[in-house]
Amino acid sequence: MLSYIDRIYRTGWVTNSGELVQELQGRLEEYLGVRHVLPVANGTLALQIAFKLLGLKGEVVTTPFSFIATASSLVWEGLRPVFADIDPETLNLDVAQIEKAITARTSAILPVHVFGNPCDVEAIEDLAARHGLQVIYDAAHAFGINYQGESLLRWGDVATLSFHATKVFHTVEGGALVIQDDELYEQAYKMVNFGITGPESIETLGINGKMNEFEAAMGLSLLDSVGARIAARKKIAQFYDDHLPASLGRQQRVRGATENHGYYPVLFESEEVVREVERRLLEKDVRPRRYFYPPLNELPFLGGSSQSVPVASGISRRILCLPIYPDLSVDDCGMIADAIVSIVGE
């Protein structure tokens, strides 16, 4: 990390597409196996830029089972999220429910690869083509995921990444747009720097979306060791697999896809059990996360309260993500597993 920081001070170039941002961009394109990665200041901004880039209007069909930014970014940009229900096994958008939610006002579909589990990308691509819709994937959880031998990020008109500090790979804050089309990438590149293309040239409406050099330094430092960090997460996931009760519900992983082990979600019998497990773990200074509760359709400022999504509503009350990070010890994993077994049984 310090070697990258030293380079910033040597060059005196701290922002505005400095050499570290450019290096990170190139290395991410190679690592992820995609044509263009455009680093930006955060993952929410990546979504907002994608909406502007594709000229979205009216309604966008999306999932209620996601982090708030997926839907709040739509509302912030004057779009209306329409929530479709999720598949109870994969936890991703149910394609049949997406189709039911499409109206004459729909301009796009915004699916989420929940916990890095690939959506039914083939069916979504077919659905979007039949209805003349754009597809933006919120791939905040899908860093480094391959599907059928290629990057999952190749799917959709645009995919967006979050590089927040909680992610498998991060730049403290940060995010990126992943774009396969050269012309679309050039438009996006202009947009993230106020539309400025030269000292006396402003070609388009833009915003300050740039990643700075210090964020890029963190990203380059972590990219050097990301393989080892994912391998460490995998060992923790395997420990949980081996020591947690088989009766707990698990997300059904899509065949043909790799995993980055960014999350370890488990489904309990009821919300009461979830709260008891959460309480017991908090007593031990362990902080699990209720991803994703409440479901987004229940937040009144998103306008989805009248939309019925019974599967997402039920699962959001029964799911808990257990701690998983490279430095988590075997002893702590065992303590977490024992606490859960003491409540739900073997």
Image (spheres, rainbow, N blue to C red):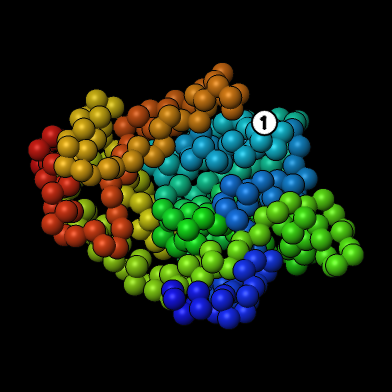
Above or below residue 7? Residue 154 is: above
Task: Specify whether 187 is left or right of 59.
Answer: right
Quadrant of residue 25 within the rendered picture? bottom right
Nearer to me, 307 or 201: 201
Relative placement, left or right, of 136 versus 279 is: right
Residue at x 47%, y 37% (from the top left corner): 65
In front of the other: 232 or 116: 232
Please, which residue is most extreme toward the right here? 200
- In percent of width and height, residue 63 lies at 53, 37
Q: Is residue 311 visible?
A: no
Quick one: which residue is furthest to the top in this view? Answer: 306
**Residue, x 41% and y 60% (percent of image)?**
168
Name the side, left or right, on which 79 lies relative to 203: left
Q: Which image quarter is the C terminus in?
A: top left
Q: Residue at x 26, y 62 (%)?
A: 327
Helix, strand or loop for disc 1:
strand
Q: Position of residue 37 (x, y in %)?
A: 62, 66
Q: Which residue is mark 1?
A: 80
Q: Identify the image quadrant of residue 255.
A: bottom left
Q: Image quadrant for the N terminus?
A: bottom left
Classify mark 1: residues with Cα within 10 Å, few (<14), some (14-19) or many (20+). Answer: many
- Report the number of numbered marks: 1
Q: Position of residue 271 (x, y in %)?
A: 28, 27
Q: Is residue 254 above or below residue 266?
A: below
Confirm whether residue 344 shows in the render. Answer: yes
Q: Amino acid at mark 1?
A: Arg
Give residue 74's quadrant in the image.
Answer: top right
